[in-house]
Image: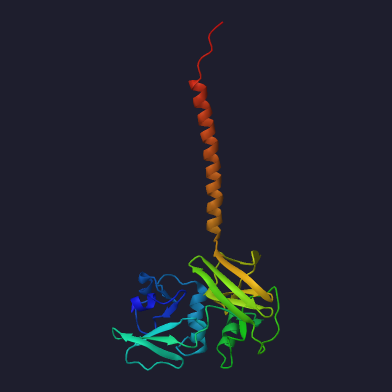
Amino acid sequence: ITDYLRAQPAPMRVRFDTSGCKPGYPALYGIEEFGGYDAVYPRRVRDYYDKLNLAPGTIGDMLLSCEFALFAENAALPQGYMKEVSMEGITIAKNMRALPRARLVGSVVSVESSERLFDALNKPGFDPRAVVYTDEKLEFSLPKADATPPGTAEITDWRADSVSIVANASKPCALVLADGYYPGWEATVDGLPTTIFPAYHLYRGIYLPAGTHTVEFRYRPASFRYGLIVSFFALGIGCVSAIVCLSRQRYRLAPAKPCA
């Protein structure tokens, strides 16, 4: 199972909770799992689990952007899943309705609370391909959802602390990256800083004007910046101390001047 999943092109996310496998186990093999850690969850992840219907085949399941899910070998597959292979008593199924990890959406709606946001996400008519909900105030506005495709987005480089995306936007829109919204993440569009907003409460979203753009997400927590400042300060002190020590050493080794 792990060999099959590790052979899939990255980035690739899997649901293991559907099979009863122990959370965190896939990480030992370098496989990305949604919510696969037993440690303290960020609050937004916990809210996502508690307030959104994430059952396989639901809209919430689409939003997870998990390309594959594991089920017991004899279990009936939910709507939208297609069997890939069965082994070791487990069926690996592909989620044909999973949304891309990075995608463009033409409309964004800001609501006043996370409760209102999850109410909207749980409504039967909600279409995540047409609209993004956020529970924070925005610095921009977009028109209501329509049938015009907003364009395409492609991940060109994906790492744990950085993601590069090339987006072709046919109109002003939002870029949604289905990775965690968390303090320390920064984003640029064509090299210029931009603001990240929480898309669907959990993911990262940014505003994009029409056109072709290069988007970069980088993880630069405050501790990293503080560490750099302290390091440069310590380096400066070290350099000054070294210069003083060398000057004193040269003074001691300098030959004494003869007496008149």
Point 63% across, 77% down: residue:
168
What's the coloring here? rainbow
User: Residue 178: x percent and y percent?
Assistant: 53, 77
User: Residue 228: x percent and y percent?
Assistant: 54, 52
Task: Name which quarter of the figure residue 37 lies in.
Answer: bottom left
* Residue at the far top in the pictured view: 260
- Residue 205, relative to residue 99: is it above or below? above
The one of 236 and 7 positioned closer to us in this rendering: 7
Task: Name which quarter of the figure residue 212 lies in.
Answer: bottom right
The one of 197 and 112 positioned closer to us in this rendering: 197
Q: Quadrant of the N terminus?
A: bottom left
* Residue at the far left in the pictured view: 88
User: Residue 41: x percent and y percent?
Assistant: 46, 72
* Horizontal relation, residue 200 to residue 35: left or right: right
The one of 216 and 184 positioned closer to us in this rendering: 216
Point 69% across, 78% down: residue:
172
- Residue 142, relative to residue 237: is it above or below? below
Point 56% across, 76% down: residue:
154
* Horizontal relation, residue 77 to residue 251: left or right: left
Point 61% across, 69% down: residue:
214
How many numbered tags mark residues here? 0
User: Residue 120: x percent and y percent?
Assistant: 59, 87
Q: Quadrant of the C terminus?
A: top right
